Amino acid sequence: MLKYGITYVHEHITIDLSGVKDNDDCNLNCLEATIKEFKDLYNLGVRNIIDVTNIGMHRNPSYVEQVAHASGINIIHSTGWYQERFLPDYIATTPIHQLADQLIMDIQMGMDGTNIKASVIGEIGTSKDTITENEEKVFNASIIAAKETGVVLSTHCTLGMLGLEQIQLLKKHHFDCRKAVIGHVDLSGNIQYILQLLEEGVYISFDTIGKENYLPDCQRIDMIKQVINAGFIDKLMLSMDITRKSHLRHYGGIGYSYLLHTFVPLMREAGIMEDHIDHMLIHNPMTFFTRSNIQ
Ligand SMILES: [Zn+2]
């Protein structure tokens, strides 16, 4: 399912959260600018992007395929629902098994009337201090669908929090934690918590690289070194979670390539070994996403 090369594990190609956020910057729909950046990524060795845009985030599988074809990058599609503020009203009223069936359809038949299939369930999320009833319902439906189809789960932790509670939900329903990646945990800034997550057997992603208004990258690098020292380098993956027009270079942002042309050199300067960098960018995503049985 993945080509050999670098993989960004948590991105959005087109996403529209502008309604809820009341901000047009959150409607990322810049096809030409995105294709231009993705061609650059290809030249930098990127071969796969996991697009975790799902139902309610205005995913657009045909648009994404256009970017994939134009750039040569293999883009993996997702299904699922995000977090409380962005959940469609029908989540509250639809039985869990029916929600699971919708996910299974997306994985086995195709999404939104296309024959483009999802191969990941994500990003399924929890709120900052709580898991709402609807969010738990989405997790439960996702677990059913993931077990049925064999795909992996990718989660959203608001500000990096509640990863342990997410893991409790997985364990309650006997989901194999090795098939889940807990997302945005770098934002917690809390290495003890991050190591606790890793003890549970999950994968984690530091996927907000470059978002220094949330957390300086030097802290991410410190935490990466501690993850390596604790023996968990096989479980850590990287990405940027680009979601806004203003993140793109065309609009003055740092762009998708920041991870490779700025963050990787910073890791090297900090003494992180090449082999460890390759694990985070190449080998770990290959191992993790090939756990999805879907081709
Ligand atoms: Zn997210």
Image (tube, helix red, strand yellow):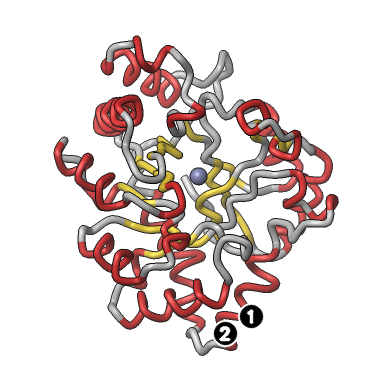
Say which amino acid is labelled 1. Pro
- Residue 200 in picture, x, y percent from top left: 21, 58
Distance from mark 1 CB to nearest ligand 1 atom below 8 Å: no
The residue to which callout 2 is attached is 268
Residue 295 in sight from this viewpoint: no
Residue at x 45%, y 22% (from the top left corner): 106
The residue to which callout 1 is attached is 265
Front residue of 158/258: it is: 158
Residue at x 65%, y 69% (from the top left corner): 260
- Residue 273 in picture, x, y percent from top left: 48, 85
Say which amino acid is labelled 2. Arg
Is residue 196 positioned above or below 85 on the image?
A: below
Residue at x 58%, y 18% (from the top left corner): 114
Residue 87's tag is none
- Residue 71 in picture, x, y percent from top left: 73, 47
Q: Quadrant of residue 56?
A: top right
Front residue of 141/113: it is: 141
The kind of secondary structure element at disc 1 is helix
**48 left or right, relative to 14:** left
Is residue 221 positioned above or below 121 on the image?
A: below
Front residue of 11/62: it is: 11
The kind of secondary structure element at disc 2 is helix
The residues tagged by marks 2 and 1 sit, at their Cα atoms, a distance apart of 5 Å
Q: Is the Cβ of the residue at disc 2 closer than 8 Å to that at disc 1?
A: yes
- Residue 107 in picture, x, y percent from top left: 42, 26
Q: How many marks?
A: 2
Residue 164 in sight from this viewpoint: yes
**45 left or right, relative to 99:** right
Q: Quadrant of residue 195?
A: bottom left
